[in-house]
């Protein structure tokens, strides 16, 4: 019994992506072929792997290859593989929907970026795989049969919202994608994709290193006999780049390979290799992308490089080979002495894999260090894109902490734009300065205007401005850099000027009563009220002890749904500020006056607001403030 043709709707994200492709904003349309060949190659990899694992799989694995055929009259191009194929459910799930994380965000960004160049850039970052077909075709037909099953499926769509599915008899194992090509339009970069010359050129350029043969009908060579009707020849070299000597490989070949494995449409920022000989032999070819993927900070993000064993593809995203904080590194590791049957679980335990991973990490950090020294512009790009991820390593990878600090850079009061490396900070430290000063918070402008900064700025001390969420964590975990401790300007007592100590001692005596009284009055909110030497213009600020968690961290924990007990910190007052001296006078004159206590409370609220904190009772604050404003009119 056969089911008739059924019509389905694309999932809404898929529909939007297709619209993007049809009204193609991407000028390099040739890449559709790379996407199809890449899918075909994946399908062959999957079949080989599955037949290793499942000896009973009834599949034909004799002559695995990709074949490209063109028909100039019918204006079609088809890409066929005899790989794993798809079931009917696969087709609906894989071709009709997009499961890729970050799709919604990607589409939103495309919508926001009005100009074509911006959208091109985004597409490059995202990659659209199979849907790229609709850049060059107004109808796409896909016929597929899953290896080991008997019934085939035929999928067809014009990309406009719906697709049809019907069963087919006698479909060969694997998948054939047939594109009904749009008319040629060279101005729009739509070339004649029925020209075998053009097609060969594209395959050479984008897919030469594919480890499976890509075949096309043999053509008559120079001074050759007419080839036999239908005879095929392989058009790619199939050479694994990582197995060729570095001097033989062009950067452009690396770039195409990078695009193949990373699904990025842009060139990588850095390319580097490892050739390890001896007991454990392996080759690695690694890349640092030029842009962070959209899912860099999402929960279900991918991580790790591809694992090959003796040239045979084993798995994508091999997390055992790359730590979480270097999850953006792409590439291939080809190990000579592993079993083809390794599983993810085994890899996590494997001593050899652990050694490879250690070496890869060192190599990545070393590469960035060299980039920092030799190519400041690339390094700056790298750090903007990946710095926040790399800093996670300060917590996770204690062995390499020092190396990570060396390649890190931070916003600083030294320069409004350019971040600084720690070694440059240390070189600029003032005489007698023993610590590296920093302040954490939500944004540069909040930090710059924070009262905590006043004395440091007035006295010319440089302060690092740390605004990534991860900064809140590592500063407490890391001991220091180059023998210098990290010190928050919002924590502990500061003593920037030893000459002022006498003056301070005197002020302490003068304000002793006020401090004791305020500490009692504000006991619910603060653990102590004391005089400050970090303020020049503000009346007050709030500081933590060295082990107190910061207000930003407190907010982060709450946002994650964790319960944080109410934090009591220290209120520091500026003894030279008229509001503070005035309060002292008022308290001496009218110690029982409720209004004086309210002013103390207002002072605390202002200090909280000044550091970007939140008031516990904003309405009360407003009421008290309004009363005082009324009096001043
Ligand atoms: N020739 C094929 N044989 C078997 N399955 C295929 C084939 N082409 C596509 N698929 C399936 O459809 C899915 C979607 O393909 P698509 O190219 O859009 O995405 P992808 O290959 O997963 O990622 P990318 O964006 O890197 O291309 C694939 O993951 C694969 O499961
Ligand atoms: Mg693909």
Image (cartoon, rainbow, N blue to C red):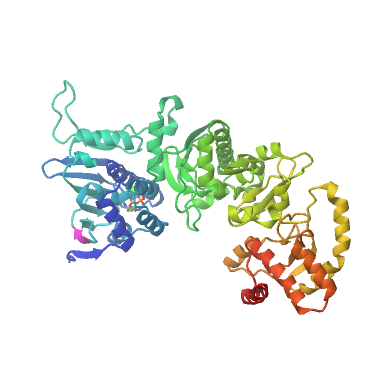
Q: Nearer the viewer, residue 334 or 548?
A: 548
Residue 379 to residue 152: above or below = above
- The residues colored magenta run 163-168
Q: Quadrant of residue 45?
A: top left
Looking at this view, name the residue that lies furthest to the left: 73
Residue 555 location in percent, x, y? 61, 64
User: Is 166 within the magenta?
Assistant: yes
* Residue occupying the point 77% across, 56% down: 492
Residue lying at 25% horizontally and 48% vertically, measured from the top left: 135
Classify 387 as above or below 366.
below
- 151 in the magenta segment: no
Res 100 seen here: no
Compared with residue 279, is residue 553 higher up or lower down, i.e. above or below? below
Of 462 and 544, nearer the camera is 462
Q: In this view of the protein, which residue sits in the foreground, 66 or 407?
A: 407
Q: Is residue 415 above or below residue 1?
A: above
Horizontal relation, residue 539 to residue 381: left or right: right
* Front-most of residues 207 and 137: 137
Q: Residue furthest front?
A: 633
Q: Main secondary structure of the magenta part?
A: strand
Residue 143 can be seen in this image: yes
Q: Quadrant of the C terminus?
A: bottom right
Residue 2 falls left or right of residue 318: left
Could you tell me which residue is drawn at 67 percent across and 60 percent down?
A: 550
Total tally of numbered discs in the picture: 0
Question: What is the x, y in percent for residue 53?
Answer: 41, 50
- Residue at (39% x, 59% y) in the render: 104
In the rendered image, residue 465, in percent from the top left (x then y), is placed at: 63, 50
* Quarter in which the N terminus is drawn: bottom left
Where residue 36 sits in the image (x, y, percent)?
29, 45
């Amino acid at each position: 019994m056969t089911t008739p043709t059924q019509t389905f709707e694309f999932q809404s994200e898929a529909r939007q992506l297709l619209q993007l492709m049809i009204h193609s904003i991407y000028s390099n349309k040739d890449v559709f072929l790379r996407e199809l060949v890449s899918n075909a190659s994946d399908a062959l990899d999957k079949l080989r792997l599955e037949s290793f694992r499942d000896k009973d799989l009834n599949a034909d694995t004799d002559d695995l290859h990709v074949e490209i055929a063109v028909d100039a009259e019918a204006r079609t191009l088809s890409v066929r593989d005899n790989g794993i194929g798809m079931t009917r459910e696969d087709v609906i799930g894989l071709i009709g929907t997009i499961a890729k994380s970050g799709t919604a965000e990607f589409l939103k960004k495309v919508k926001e970026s009005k100009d074509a160049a911006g959208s091109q850039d985004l597409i490059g970052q995202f990659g659209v795989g199979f849907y790229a077909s609709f850049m060059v075709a107004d109808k796409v037909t896909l016929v597929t049969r899953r290896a080991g099953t008997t019934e085939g499926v035929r999928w067809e769509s014009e990309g406009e919202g719906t697709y049809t599915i019907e069963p087919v008899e006698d479909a060969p194992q694997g998948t054939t994608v047939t594109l009904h090509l749009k008319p040629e339009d060279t101005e729009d970069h739509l070339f004649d994709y029925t020209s075998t010359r053009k097609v060969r050129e594209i395959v050479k350029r984008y897919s030469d290193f594919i480890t499976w043969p890509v075949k096309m009908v043999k053509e008559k060579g120079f001074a050759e006999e007419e080839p036999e009707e239908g005879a095929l020849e392989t058009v790619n070299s199939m050479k694994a780049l990582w197995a060729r000597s570095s001097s033989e490989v062009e950067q452009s070949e690396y770039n195409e390979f990078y695009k193949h494995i990373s699904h990025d449409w842009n060139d990588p920022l850095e390319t580097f290799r490892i050739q390890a000989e001896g007991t454990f032999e392996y080759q690695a070819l690694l890349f640092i992308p030029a842009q962070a993927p959209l899912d860099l900070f999402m929960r279900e993000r991918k991580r790790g490089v591809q694992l090959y064993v003796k040239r045979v593809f084993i798995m994508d995203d091999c997390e055992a080979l790359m730590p979480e904080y270097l999850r953006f590194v792409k590439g291939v590791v080809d190990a000579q002495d592993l079993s083809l049957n390794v599983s993810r679980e085994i890899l996590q335990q494997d001593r050899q894999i652990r050694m490879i991973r250690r070496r890869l990490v060192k190599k990545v950090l070393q590469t960035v260090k060299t980039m920092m020294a030799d190519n400041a512009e690339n390094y700056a790009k790298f750090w903007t894109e990946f710095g926040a991820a790399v800093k996670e390593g300060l917590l996770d990878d204690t062995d390499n902490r020092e190396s990570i600090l060396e390649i890190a850079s931070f916003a600083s009061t030294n320069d409004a734009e350019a971040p600084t490396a720690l070694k440059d900070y240390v070189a600029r430290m003032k005489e007698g300065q023993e610590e590296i000063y920093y302040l954490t918070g939500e944004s540069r402008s909040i930090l710059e205007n924070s009262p905590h900064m006043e004395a440091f700025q007035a006295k010319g001390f440089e302060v690092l401005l740390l605004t990534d969420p991860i900064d809140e964590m590592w500063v407490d975990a890391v001991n220091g850099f180059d023998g210098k401790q990290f010190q928050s300007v919002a924590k502990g007592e500061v003593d920037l000027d030893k000459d002022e100590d006498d003056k301070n001692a005197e002020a302490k005596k003068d304000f002793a009563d006020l401090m004791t009284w305020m500490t009692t009055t504000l006991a619910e909110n603060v653990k102590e009220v004391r005089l400050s030497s970090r303020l020049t213009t503000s009346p007050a600020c709030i500081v933590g002890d060295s082990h107190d968690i910061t207000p930003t961290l407190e907010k982060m924990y709450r946002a994650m749904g964790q319960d944080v007990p109410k934090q009591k910190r220290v209120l520091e007052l500026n003894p030279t500020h008229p509001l503070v001296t005035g309060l002292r006078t008022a308290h001496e004159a009218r110690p029982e006056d409720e209004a004086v206590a309210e002013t103390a409370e207002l002072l605390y609220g202002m200090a909280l607001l000044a550091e970007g904190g939140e008031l516990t009772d904003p309405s009360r604050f407003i009421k008290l403030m309004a009363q005082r404003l009324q009096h001043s009119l």
